[in-house]
Image (tube, rainbow, N blue to C red):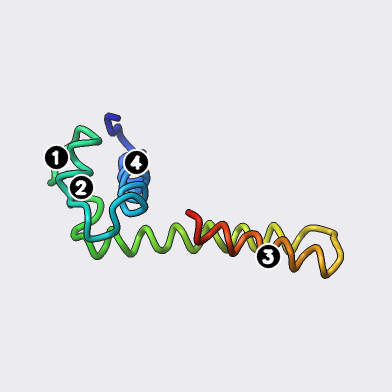
């Protein structure tokens, strides 16, 4: 996968998210991400100065995704029991990912 233009930050997050899921946060390096994207480590540091900032961006993206999913469940016109099941399913999917 070769990173291009404006999408580079998103591509970095996509690769980092997968690597975190596969290896854990401490199990990958900037070099791993850079190599997979075909970019330099300096390009990674341009978007995310350190691994802590990359981790923070991953958490923010994940939290936004989860919040959107909660809003979608809340917006459904279903009874309380079905809504509770939908929330529970969403919660279990969080841990599966």
Task: Determine whether the residue tagged by mark 1 lies in a helix, strand or loop.
Answer: loop
Q: Which mark is residue 11?
A: 4
Query: Viewer-proximal residue, 62 or 48?
Result: 62
* Rendered location of residue 51, percent (x, y): 21, 60
Query: Viewer-proximal residue, 97 or 40?
Result: 97
In-image side of 74 versus 89 (left or right): right
* Rendered location of residue 24, percent (x, y): 29, 58
Marks 3/2: CA distance? Answer: 36 Å
Residue at 85% x, 61% y is 78
Q: Which mark is residue 87?
A: 3
Residue at 59% x, 64% y is 91
* Relative to 35, residue 78 above or below: below
Marks 1/3: CA distance? Answer: 41 Å
Residue at 36% x, 38% y is 7
Q: Nearer the viewer, mark 3 or mark 2?
A: 3
Q: Residues within 10 Å of mark 1 (few under 14, many from 20)?
A: some
In-image side of 51 versus 18 (left or right): left
Q: Residues within 10 Å of mark 2 (few under 14, many from 20)?
A: many
Q: Earlier in the sequence, mark 4 or mark 1?
A: 4
Marks 4/1: CA distance? Answer: 14 Å
Q: Nearer the viewer, mark 1 or mark 3?
A: 3
Q: Which mark is residue 44?
A: 2
Q: Which residue is mark 1?
A: 40
Query: Viewer-proximal residue, 45 or 15?
Result: 15
């Amino acid at each position: 996968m070769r990173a291009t233009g404006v999408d580079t930050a998103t591509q970095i997050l996509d690769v980092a998210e997968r690597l975190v899921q596969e290896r854990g946060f401490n199990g990958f390096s900037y070099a791993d991400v850079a190599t997979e994207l075909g970019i330099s480590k300096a390009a990674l540091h341009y978007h995310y100065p350190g691994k802590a900032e990359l981790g923070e961006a991953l958490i923010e993206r994940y939290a936004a995704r989860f919040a959107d999913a909660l809003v979608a469940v809340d917006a459904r016109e279903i009874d309380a029991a079905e809504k509770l099941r939908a929330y529970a399913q969403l919660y279990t999917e969080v841990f599966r990912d």
